[in-house]
Image (cartoon, helix red, strand yellow):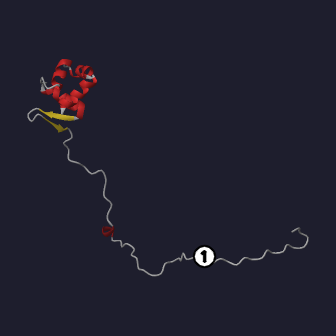
């Protein structure tokens, strides 16, 4: 995994800054990325931390998560309805509360006559 990531960085041309920060030559990093050379475990540890935030295990030649703490809960689950002793409303059936049938038209009312003194 380190080799492939380092090869991708080498392909983009970013090995000089990384080599300066790690105290290693660019040629050593380039040859390691192409699978031709080896790097000391201290450098591999620094690469693992830089790329993945992980630790390098030299005995297994694998990466390991840096966070070894057990997962902790970030919140508390609210109690369920049964734990709180509540009952949920149930449907009892019966007629609907409101009917949405067709609207009956009202008969047209004639206009009211205006009082005297007003123009129609």
Residue placed most toward the observer, 37 or 58: 37
Secondary structure, mark 1, is loop
Image quarter in which the N terminus is found? top left
User: Who's the residue at 27% across and 51% down the image?
Assistant: 73
> How far from the left and from the top, in percent, is residue 51?
24, 31
**In the displayed image of the protein, which residue is found farthest to the right?**
117
Quadrant of residue 86 within the rendered picture: bottom left
> How far from the left and from the top, in percent, is residue 46?
20, 28
Above or below, 118 against 71 in this view is: below
**In the displayed image of the protein, which residue is found farthest to the left?**
59
Residue placed most toward the observer, 11 or 89: 11
User: Who's the residue at 20% across and 35% down the image?
Assistant: 54
Q: Which residue is mark 1?
A: 103
- Position of residue 106 in the picture relative to residue 73 (left or right): right
Q: Is residue 25 visible?
A: no
Instruction: Please tell me how many numbered marks the rendered image carries.
Output: 1
Residue placed most toward the observer, 3 or 80: 3
- Position of residue 32 in the picture relative to residue 97 (left or right): left
> How far from the left and from the top, in percent, is residue 6?
21, 27
Dot 1 crowding, Cα within 10 Å, few <14, some 14–19, many 20+ = few
Above or below, 23 against 48 in this view is: above
Quadrant of residue 7 within the rendered picture: top left
């Amino acid at each position: 995994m380190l080799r492939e990531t380092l090869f991708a960085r080498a392909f983009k041309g970013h090995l000089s800054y990384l080599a300066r920060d790690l105290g290693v030559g660019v040629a050593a990093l380039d040859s390691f990325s192409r699978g031709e050379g080896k790097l000391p475990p201290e450098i591999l540890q620094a690469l693992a931390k830089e790329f993945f935030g992980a630790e390098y295990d030299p005995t297994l030649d694998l990466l390991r998560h840096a966070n070894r703490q057990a997962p902790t809960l970030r919140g508390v689950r609210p109690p369920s309805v049964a734990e709180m002793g509540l009952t949920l409303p149930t449907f009892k059936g019966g007629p609907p509360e409101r009917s949405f049938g067709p609207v009956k038209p009202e008969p047209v009312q004639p206009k009211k006559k205006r009082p005297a003194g007003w123009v129609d």
